[in-house]
Image (cartoon, helix red, strand yellow):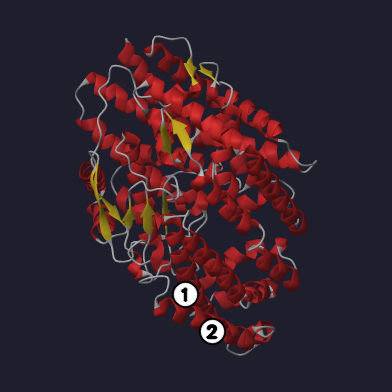
Amino acid sequence: MADRNGAKGATQGETAGLGALPAWNLGDLYAAPDAPAYAHDLADAAKRAREFASRYRGKLAALAAGPNGAGELHEAIVAYEGLDDLLGRIISYASLVYAGDTSDPANGKFYGDAQEQVTTISSDLLFFTLELNRLDDKLVDRLAATAPLEHYRPWLDDIRKEKPYQLDDKLEQLFHEKAVTGRGAWNRLFDETMAGLRFEVDGKTLAIEPTLSLMQDADAAKRKAAAEALAATFKHNLRGFTLITNTLAKDKEISDRWRGFTDVADSRHLANRVEREVVDALVEAVRAAYPRLSHRYYRLKAKWFGRDTLDHWDRNAPLPQVAQRTIGWDEARDTVLSAYGGFAPRMAEIAQGFFDKGWIDAPVRPGKAPGAFAHPTVPSVHPYVLLNYQGKPRDVMTLAHELGHGVHQVLAAHNGALMAPTPLTLAETASVFGEMLTFRKLLAEIKDPKARKALIAGKVEDMINTVVRQIAFYSFERKVHLARRRGELTAEQLGEAWMSVQAESLGPAIVLHPGYENFWTYVPHFIHSPFYVYAYAFGDCLVNSLYGVYQNASDGFVERYFAMLSAGGTKHHAELLAPFGLDARDPAFWSIGLGMIEGLIDELEGLEA
């Protein structure tokens, strides 16, 4: 099992034009699922959690009010953080093993067992933040102003934002333990169902990643065949996906109602530490910009194809009369590292470690989790990156994106397990900035007008996918969750909601053919992280504004940028953006980011003249 899951580190064999693709080495977490160290850590975590509960449950108020309140609370938080890191290591390893091949029953059992064991152990810790939040605010403020507790003041301030939505201890424990058989189980069912789907394209049976990749093929017939194969398989599995979506939406409604959240997205805004009005301003600004961004661009793209409209399977098609080539892994690596190094050598140095130390898993494999991610694991180890690399230009940008996450996670790790995690709205900053650096470097080196046009068009499409498409996804989720409060939704209702937001966001130049109404089924964020999607748009617009600051006043920018990433979750977005003269609460802020996309479309139109 160790070799199959990459615990010893490896590179896959040569893959058609890509070179040797790396498989990750999970040995820095554990040598294998049956390794003695893994079993030891599980037992140790259980023992320490019981001892922690015995020592502190029901006693925090008295300790805080005592003569050494700050010291006592500091000692308790240090112990709690150590357990958080240990449990995080265990579940991170299990989830990465599972992501490597979700179709393997042994991996599924290992991951499922780990979820249950970690949930059971952490039940003994659940009381801690609840009791901390029942302490008098003035007392906590006074104690947190003194050493050594002041180190954890950002975390104490942060968890107190959850205070209005906390339930009593027994209810919290019930919610916590039922998650394994509730949301967690439905998430796993979605993952395993999606990994098991197969699509018949031109006589070949493909998994979802290679099928989706064909939607970017230069051959229009292949794009259409892939789209029809996706539609056919999604339709065949529609009943299951409809049940999963209805169940999870109802599960969320129950949780929100008990906790006192009023809007369907308020719990996500709280988790992101962003105000509802900030998100509403973003959504309003992007929706108002649809005609200037996506509608305008797709009209232009249809013109390049000699048509008035494009079929939905042509939306991400490469430009006609532009040579397509496969980008090997070594070239992709060197491109991204060079772009990072041009901005800051330290950034390239951190990213280089991912390649040198076996922290990346790149090949497409049957059963492997689709898409891409950077998993932070825990501060005591390091992040891991999963890709499904197929040599397309967008795959290079995905590498740049996920490495940006990885660099961010490495820089924030010094804050410790409790304060390293960054709210999702700012968690996309380094990833999108890494993409922008890579794009700008490539653009500066291109002299051929056709190649320059293709690169700019690709970037515009990526930005539309990140901003316009994700806000459309957010609008779809709002429709679904609001409608679910009135009763269970049929597949037809879900399809109608999907088609309405897609038509609005993509515009009249994209023809949505029958079958597209079921494409909502494969978006994992709807399942795993409801309302996460606006974080991508937030991050893209934020990075566009940041990059504008960098271009206009680069002196000292790198230092401020690294300070922002290094802050992890210790500061609010307003405090982190202030050194750059930016404020996401200002409606004009979003116009800056959207204006950069418009500027690139202007340049494309200029190339037509």
Residue under pointer 2: 48
Compare residues 95 and 235 and report the one nearer the observer: 235
Which residue is farthest right?
486
Q: Locate residue 64: give its quadrant.
A: bottom right
Percent coordinates x, y for residue 180 in the rendering: 63, 63
Residue under pointer 1: 86
The residue under label 1 is which amino acid type?
Leu
Compare residues 417 and 154 and report the one nearer the observer: 417
| Spatial CA span between label 2 and label 1 | 10 Å
Tell me: residue 540, above or below residue 259: above
Percent coordinates x, y for residue 205 in the rendering: 43, 37
Residues at marks 2 and 1 touching, judged by CB atoms closer than 8 Å = yes
Percent coordinates x, y for residue 229 in the rendering: 49, 30
Viewer can see residue 274: no
**Element under disc 1:** helix
Looking at the rendered image, the quarter that the N terminus falls into is bottom left
Left or right of 204, for residue 498: right
For disc 2, the neighbor class at 10 Å (few under 14, some 14 to 19, many from 20) is: some
For disc 1, the neighbor class at 10 Å (few under 14, some 14 to 19, many from 20) is: some
Q: Number of labelled discs?
A: 2
Tell me: residue 243, above or below residue 148: above
Left or right of 360, for residue 65: right
Compare residues 341 and 41 and report the one nearer the observer: 41
Tell me: residue 376, above or below residue 203: below
Left or right of 137, for residue 424: left
Tell me: residue 21, above or below residue 353: above
Looking at the rendered image, the quarter that the C terminus falls into is top left
